[in-house]
Image (cartoon, rainbow, N blue to C red):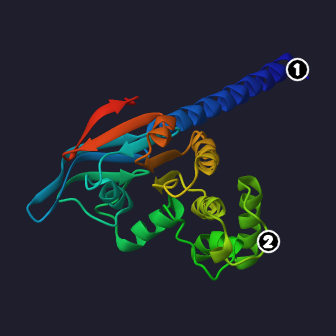
């Protein structure tokens, strides 16, 4: 090989290495940028029922990797706030975005897809279909999103093993309180949502079961690409979250651990 040919080959190799490093750097920057983009964002939100103003110029920002507890007295609008985030209610003013999508302006099909794929919801009492088994309850959202039943059931069983849900094929109506909540959590996670929302998920559980269910949710939240929003009356539950928002008179007061 001539000296000129050797030099050209070396140059091509060097350019190839530089290109790989540049691409890797761009991918790292894209990933870092995605991690800092809010998963949930409410800006200047105003919402009222008739003459009663529930929220006035309300702001809320939740980032990837963050867990947030929403606390407040009964009637302050905690569940309504969740309805605004999921698009079940619309504010009279302001901006609501979830994973970058405007919930207010999204078409029905887009909003439906957002709820199926990007938002997982855990209710206080599980809200399982009583005649279906735990695995069928967990698999159902995946099937509704286009998965085949056998694949969805296998994915459901993987989640059941990781969350400690009994694998026996009993109707959901026979599950204990802790088993129901674990099943509800698995159902919320089956489509790998980036936003996990839990509305009083431990309100009907004893202390030990509450802590176990919280551990499962917090461990999920620790994945850097997702967030957790908890509505609770329980100070023990609220204290587990990174950030605590106290809702009062349509505003957040005494925010602990605010992320900027």
Rendering coords of residue 93 (x, y %)? 17, 55
Q: Could you tell me residue 51's position as x and y percent?
A: 8, 61
Q: Is residue 87 left or right of residue 156?
A: left
Q: Who's the residue at 74% across and 53% down the image?
A: 162
SS label for mark 2: loop
* Number of numbered tags placed on the structure image: 2
Q: Looking at the picture, does residue 224 appear above or below residue 158?
A: above
> From the viewer's perspective, is 6 left or right of 118?
right
Q: Look at the picture and state if 257 lies above or below 66.
A: above
The answer to whether residue 186 is above or below residue 57 is: below
Residue in the picture at 71% in, 71% down: 135
Disc number placed over residue 168 in the picture, else none: 2
N-term mark: 1 or 2: 1
Identify the secondary structure beneath mark 1: loop
Q: Nearer the viewer, mark 1 or mark 2?
A: 2
In the rendered view, does 63 fall on the left or right side of 23? left
Q: Nearer the viewer, residue 79 or 120?
A: 79
* Alpha-carbon span between mark 1 and mark 2: 72 Å
Q: Is residue 60 left or right of residue 26?
A: left
User: Which of the labelled discs sits on residue 2, or is there none?
Assistant: 1
Image coordinates for residue 29, horizontal then vertical, percent: 54, 32
User: Could you tell me if residue 147 is visible in this image?
Assistant: no
Q: Quadrant of the N terminus?
A: top right
Q: Contact, CB < 8 Å: mark 1 with mark 2?
A: no
């Amino acid at each position: 090989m001539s000296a000129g040919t050797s030099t050209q080959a070396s140059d091509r190799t060097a350019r190839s290495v530089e290109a790989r490093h540049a691409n890797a750097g761009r991918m790292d920057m894209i990933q870092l940028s995605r991690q800092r983009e809010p998963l949930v964002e409410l800006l200047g939100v105003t919402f009222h029922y008739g003459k009663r103003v529930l929220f006035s110029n309300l702001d809320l920002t939740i980032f990837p990797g963050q867990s947030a507890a929403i606390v407040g007295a009964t009637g302050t609008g905690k569940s309504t706030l969740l309805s605004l985030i999921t698009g079940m209610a619309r504010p009279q003013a302001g901006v609501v975005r979830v994973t970058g999508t405007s919930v207010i302006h999204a078409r029905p099909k887009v909003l439906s897809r957002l709820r199926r794929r990007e938002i997982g919801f855990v209710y206080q009492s599980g809200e399982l279909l009583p005649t279906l088994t735990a695995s069928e309850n967990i698999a159902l959202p995946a099937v509704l999103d286009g998965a085949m039943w056998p694949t969805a059931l296998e994915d459901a069983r993987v989640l059941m093993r990781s969350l400690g849900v009994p694998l026996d094929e009993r109707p959901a109506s026979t599950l204990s309180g802790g088993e129901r909540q674990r099943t509800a959590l698995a159902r919320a996670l089956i489509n790998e949502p980036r936003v996990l929302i839990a509305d009083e998920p431990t309100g009907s559980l004893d202390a030990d079961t509450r802590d176990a269910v919280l551990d499962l949710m917090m461990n999920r939240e620790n994945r850097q690409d997702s967030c957790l929003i908890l509505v609770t009356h329980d100070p023990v539950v609220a204290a587990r979250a990174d950030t605590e928002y106290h809702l009062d008179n349509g505003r957040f007061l005494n925010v602990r651990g605010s992320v900027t």
